[in-house]
Amino acid sequence: QATTILIAISVGFALDDPSYELVGPSPSSLLRRRGWRVLVIVPPTAVAWMALASLQGPRGVEETWALAAMFAGLVGLTLGVAGAAGRRSGGRGGPVVAPIILFALILSSALPAEWRPMPMGDVPGGWPAIYIRWWSVAVLGVLILLMSSRDPARRGVVRASRTKRVRSSQGPPRP
């Protein structure tokens, strides 16, 4: 589990974009740029994780699938947190990911077992409950990533045109 957490957290640095401010108004949207980054980094990371997981030798098929669901959930949440944080910090969301994910895991572990959204151990309902919770975390993370990947340049154009119409309807500016 510790290996899964560390590898998943490292994926968050894939969305760091030092040229965020320069390529903001480029013809390539933020979603497309982030999509390419995710496509380049996630498959090799998943292969490395699978190799490490097979070397560790999980006890059974259920544990293997639970670890895979945990990896997917943490990667999805990491990408979502990195995307949202990068949106607010000029393209540098990676350094924020580890503290937020670790805090979320600690907070989840402090809750009663039946209420843990990110279970690190047994929960009522067994393996299916673990799978469902971790895959739900993955979907939530991907949704956060998609919402934070709306192109700021395109949104600015719409706002600018609305502002221009409002100002032109009010008449000349007052001194």
Image (spheres, rainbow, N blue to C red):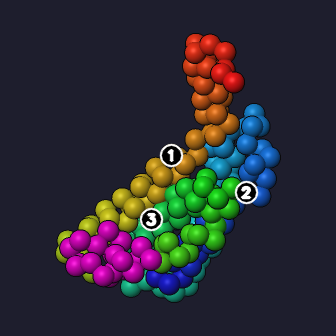
In the figure, is residue 17 to the left or right of 12? Answer: right
Q: Earlier in the sequence, mark 1 or mark 3?
A: 3
Pick the residue in front: 4 or 25: 25
Q: Give the residue number, with chain letter if any, for mark 3.
A: 73
Label 3 sits on a secondary structure element that is helix
In the figure, is residue 28 to the left or right of 145? Answer: right
Span of residues in magenta: 103-121
- Residue 25: x and y in percent read 75, 37
Which amino acid, by three-letter code, is at mark 1? Met
* In the image, residue 141 above or below residue 128: above
Q: Give the residue number, with chain letter if any, for mark 1.
A: 147
Q: Residues within 10 Å of mark 2 (few under 14, many from 20)?
A: some
Q: Give the residue number, with chain letter if any, for mark 2.
A: 17
* In the image, residue 8 above or below residue 169: below
Pick the residue in front: 94 or 56: 94
Residue at 56 percent of width and 75 percent of height = 98
**Is mark 1 in CB contact (under 8 Å) with mark 3?**
no
Which amino acid, by three-letter code, is at mark 2? Asp
In the figure, is residue 144 to the left or right of 116? Answer: right
Residue at 53 percent of width and 61 percent of height = 81
Which amino acid, by three-letter code, is at mark 3? Gly
- Asked whether 106 falls inside the magenta stretch, the response is yes
Q: State the separation of the CA atoms marked 1 and 3.
A: 17 Å
The mark found on residue 111 in the picture is none
